[in-house]
Image (tube, rainbow, N blue to C red):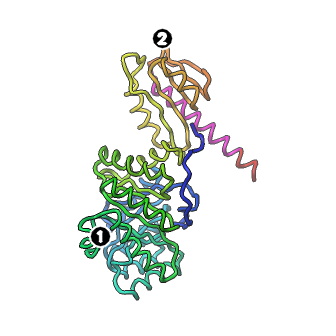
Amino acid sequence: MHAQSPIIRRKSRQIHVGKIAVGGGAPISVQSMTNTDTLDVAATVAQIRQLEAAGADIVRVSVPTMEAAETFGRIKREVEVPLVADIHFDYKIALRVAELGVDCLRINPGNIGKEERVRAVVSAARDNGIPIRIGVNAGSLEKELQRKYGEPTPEALVESAMRHIDHLDRLDFQEYKVSVKASDVFMAVAAYRQLATLIEQPLHLGITEAGGLRSGTVKSSIGLGMLLMDGIGDTIRVSLAADPVEEIKVGFDMLKSLRLRAKGINFIACPSCSRQNFDVIGTMNALEERLDDIMTPLDVSVIGCVVNGPGEAKEVDVGLTGGSPANLVYIDGKPASKLSNDNLVDDLERLIRERVRLKEQAEQDVLARSQ
């Protein structure tokens, strides 16, 4: 199941957000944004750590005031994951968080104000090795573009982005990434496709304000999936009106399904029917919850009967096929043992964790031999 993805990714310039490479063939990074009050250091740090534990590569934090900038500095000292500061209008906030060690500035040069203010922000970014993210949103287009186009369109999003990019180009600053987000899937996809042909910088993908957990996941999966299949996208955020941790989970599930990232367990499970020899849905729900902490890539199939079960089990690391009087477990595609329905979840969890342990040990052994 870990075969190479057939997707040919768009070539892009590489930048670094802290320790995370973005673009230039680097793994597509997954990020989210805190929704706590930035002034509440304890709550914000706790949420950032939850996101990091879920696998977040980058976390964005809103910094709307100078007081929040000072608080951001305290937050930054307490976490390991790279942080992006989300800033609008007040260029002095950008200058301050640059001094405090921010890993990336999310700004729109056009709303920072006069040219000298943009120049000051770019100089701070250059001097501190900080990239900039230009973030264009269909809901906050410049009034001039709203009058020109009458309504948000892909062309309006791209024109807005190119205006902001022009600010950075005039200052010979190339360490940036760009997003052109819309809540409409067709608009966002068309805008990203256009922009991908115009610049070499990395693209940050997102369907903004996508909706709640279920509807937002569906909308984001369609929109981002179309772009990722085109090879477009170097870092992604799934914008959900839900726990930010869910954004990370959905993002990685998207990338796993396209074989663009391998992290955690990739479950193959049947929807269940009257042929099932155990409670497939209950087993899957329990396994996903219990094994949520595992980051090592592993393919696991959970199939309720012998129609498709053996075939799927032969292609994965650990496979469970329903059978009577006992279910059959496959390890590395070969029949290994049988499990009764009594304590099925406990026994299967134990087998999976042991398989993870052995895989991690083998990887460590290879690494040790190469040093």
Pick the residue in front: 302 or 141.
Answer: 141
The magenta span reads 342-365
Which residue is at 52% across, 74% downward?
Answer: 174
Residue at far bottom of view: 116
Tag 2 residue: 325
Place residue 142 in its image quadrant: bottom left
Type of amino acid at the residue the image marks with label 2: Pro
Would residue 360 be counted in the magenta stretch? yes
Which residue is at 67% across, 40% downward?
Answer: 362
x, y (%) of residue 108? 37, 74
Pick the residue in front: 61 or 260.
Answer: 260
Relative to 92, 201 lies left or right? right
Task: Examine the rendered structure and indicate whether residue 48 appears above or below residue 317.
Answer: below
Using a 10 Å C-alpha cutoff, classify the residue at mark 2 as few (fewer than 14 neighbours), some (14 to 19) or many (20 or more). Answer: few
Relative to 336, 267 lies left or right? left
Which residue is at 36% across, 73% downward?
Answer: 87
Would residue 9 be counted in the magenta stretch? no
Pick the residue in front: 27 or 354.
Answer: 27
Type of amino acid at the residue the image marks with label 1: Leu
Using a 10 Å C-alpha cutoff, classify the residue at mark 1 as few (fewer than 14 neighbours), some (14 to 19) or many (20 or more). Answer: some
x, y (%) of residue 82? 48, 64
- Label 1: state its secondary structure: loop
x, y (%) of residue 292? 45, 41
Tag 1 residue: 141
State the count of labels: 2
The disc, 1 or 2, on the residue closer to the chain's N-terminal end is 1
Task: Examine the rendered structure and indicate whether residue 298 appears above or below residue 371.
Answer: above
Which residue is at 50% across, 38% downward?
Answer: 266
x, y (%) of residue 188? 36, 58
